[in-house]
Image: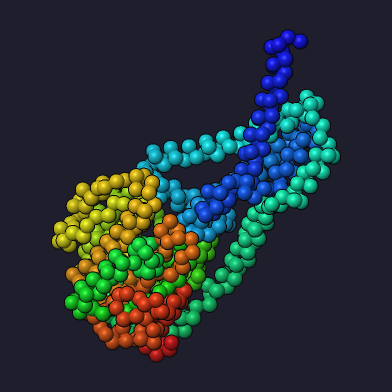
Amino acid sequence: MNVEAARSGRVAPIAMGVRIAIGILVLFSILAMPVDLASIRQLPFALTPAEAFCIVAFIAILPRSAGRWMLRVVMLLAGLMLFVKLADLGTRAAFARDFNPVLDLHLLRSGWHLLSGSVGRVGAIGAIAITSAAFAGVLCLLGWGLGGIVHLRRNGRIALGAPALAAAILVAVFAADPAPAARLVAERTQSTAQSLREFAAFDALIGEDPLRNIEAGSLLSGLAGRDVVLAFVESYGRSAVEDAPYAEEVRARLAAVEDGIGRAGFSARSGWLTAPTVGGQSWLSHATLLSGLWVDGQRRYERLVASRRASLNALFRQAGWRSAALMPAITMAWPEGDWYGYDAIHARDDLGYRGEPFNWVTMPDQYTLAALQRLELGTVRSRPLMAELALISSHAPWTPIPPLLPWGDVGNGTIFTPYASAGDPPEVVWRDPERVRQQYALSIDYALETLGSFVETYGGDDQLFIILGDHQPAPIITGESASRDVPIHILSRDRELLERLDEWGWTRGMVPSRGAPVWRMDAFRERFVRAFSDGAGS
């Protein structure tokens, strides 16, 4: 044997060993990959997944044809495992909960709209292409690496047999984490089954409306002749009011709003509600508050909007109000809007905004409020108005944020265009978590300042304003252990109206106290309607 042949003989086994080691490393990484951000920085082998030893052993001892099929099964299951774990990282970062395949597949579409609205359609397609290629590349690397074991079996170079299987079982018994992948599968199977069981219970609750027996003449009679404006403020959570680094700025803004509306003759009551979601899916909070049911997932939402349950909007309409919605984030057909019972839906294209969008945010809150005055509040009507707004300037990515402009200058919104490209874009801001938090605080400050100014400027004697957050922002803003509470404020010039709420124990003014009662968001509908329906009881 010549020298080159000898070297070749040595290199081939070394190359094959490296190949197999790479496959085992990828397998270990997938199985041991953490599903929460707090653990993502740990070494992937902090807990050794025993399943990896068993998988490698079975591929090694099986006949080569069976080994090839085993390898395909492993690649399929590893791909599913990787998808679920990546989905967990995403939903935990955005919504502070695990991914649920029954409830969350619709988020793929929502994620596309958010991504394309933030970085553009081309950028979104590029990001998805890169992510998909990386995902496929990992699985190909896994198959190529573990395929080296099958290759050796084909050439008769290994015969592990029973000793290999026995060694794998022995390692599994003494591994630091004997079955993380199996445990994850069991947990997801259990949570999926639980979700399916809960749907049946939820369907029964839909028909049990505690307000169905309120007489028509009594329904919301305490608000007769008054316009009601219900404004959801995106990502306005309890953390903004109580936690550093936001509380000082936001509480100062709330105090300033209280002074301003006080000069205009308004008083306020403030409390806390617990939202069903965190970080996104605002429509679940809207549906929860307006239906009086706990809508914490898309499947519940779909069941609700297919039902005959009367929303709070529909109850106002039944009692003689005109019901309208201003939804600047609605950019496509919205058939679910029929369930809410609106007389009119003003979506993005109906609001007349001619300025540039602020990344995903289609228009600033000030323009939406100005449109409310122009399209609904300021019109001559034969009926009082119940208007619902979804204000979105405080939606991620929280940049850029416009200043509050004179109301008379708002016009068709082109005045906002210079501010739509001001400052650093999201891809720059989001490199620094501290800057993201600063931008979040600025966005909440802007939303509250704008609402306060609107009430001062356009608020009247016969109006009631309900202002609340839809949910807490993502954990990057609040931390992992934040509550799901959001502030709520009710404003009116009529002190007798607000006195109807005294038994609620809410705080007087715009700054809710830490000890103010906390209700689940689904409790508001019944409490509010009974408080303003004479003779309906508490």
Q: Residue at x 24, y 55 (%)?
A: 402
Instruction: Answer with the quarter of the image where residue 533 lies.
Output: bottom left
Of residue 2 and residue 324, the one placed in the foreground of this image is: 2
Q: Residue at x 76, y 51 (%)?
A: 173
Q: Residue at x 34, y 52 (%)?
A: 435
Q: Is residue 502 above or below residue 199?
A: below
Q: Is residue 24 above or below residue 252?
A: above
Instruction: Answer with the quarter of the image where residue 232 lies.
Output: bottom left
Q: Residue at x 39, y 84 (%)?
A: 505
Instruction: Answer with the quarter of the image where residue 146 lies.
Output: top right
Residue extending farthest front: 3
Q: How is the image coloured?
A: rainbow
Residue extending farthest top: 2
**Number of marks in the rendered image:** 0
Residue extending farthest right: 162
Of residue 284 and residue 8, the one placed in the foreground of this image is: 8
**Image quadrant occupied by the N terminus:** top right
Of residue 160 and residue 460, the one placed in the foreground of this image is: 160
> Can see residue 377?
no
Question: How far across and how far down the image is residue 75, in percent?
Answer: 66, 39
Question: How far across and how far down the image is residue 203, in percent?
Answer: 57, 69
Q: Is residue 423 above or below residue 377?
A: above
Question: How far across and how far down the image is residue 219, in percent?
Answer: 38, 83
For residue 80, side relative to residue 374 (left or right): right
**Image quadrant occupied by the C terminus:** bottom left
> Can see residue 501?
yes
Question: How far across and how far down the image is residue 208, in percent?
Answer: 53, 77
Q: Is residue 359 above or below residue 342?
A: above
